[in-house]
Amino acid sequence: MILGAALAVLCLAACQGGKKGQTVLPNVHEDAGIVLSGLDAEHWTYFSLETGETVGRSTFLDEAEDAAWAARTDWDIAICGDYLKTNGGTSGQGLGGILRDTEHNFLTLEEAPSEGYLIDEVGIVK
């Protein structure tokens, strides 16, 4: 799941498109993209790269909901407005991480880099 989460995060900035409230991710299983719908700045939308589906939503800054999602392992990334979190670090029990990679083309990348990933922690990354 680390590979999937990292690769999805890599393409978020480059692959955003579609209509307002949607983010388009390349599908790791097919040539077509994955469209995440219903995104907004008031709710986290949780997504599984394994299934290619949205697995749920929670209210932004709701501590009880955040704790419930942190205990789950069926999601890889979550998006809320301009915020992104991975299932790892302070956000979850998974092994998700993020890597900003400006040297490779996501669509032709055959193997994820083995190091340089950051895990979620409290704060804002710029």
Image: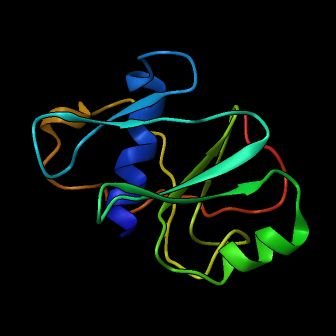
Residue 96 coordinates in the image, percent (x, y)? 50, 67
Identity of the residue drawn at 38% across and 46% down: 8
| Residue visible at 59% across and 72% down in the picture | 88
Relative to 32, say whether 79 is above or below: below
- Work out which quarter of the rendered image holds the N terminus and state it: bottom left
- Residue 115 quadrant: bottom left
Looking at the picture, how far across and down is residue 102, in whole percent? 39, 30
Query: As displayed, is residue 123 above or below residue 55?
Result: above
Determine the image quadrant of residue 108: top left
Q: Quadrant of the C terminus?
A: top right
**Coloration mode:** rainbow
Q: Is residue 60 left or right of residue 110?
A: right
Residue 38, compared with residue 120, is above or below; it is above
57 sits to left or right of 8: right
Of 125 and 42, nearer the camera is 42
What residue is at 33 percent from the left and 58 percent from the top? 4
* Location of residue 26 in the rendering, given as x and y in whole percent from the top left corner: 26, 37
Tell me: residue 1, above or below residue 52.
Answer: below
Place of residue 25 in the rendered image (x, y in percent of width and height, measured from the top left): 34, 36
Q: How many marks?
A: 0
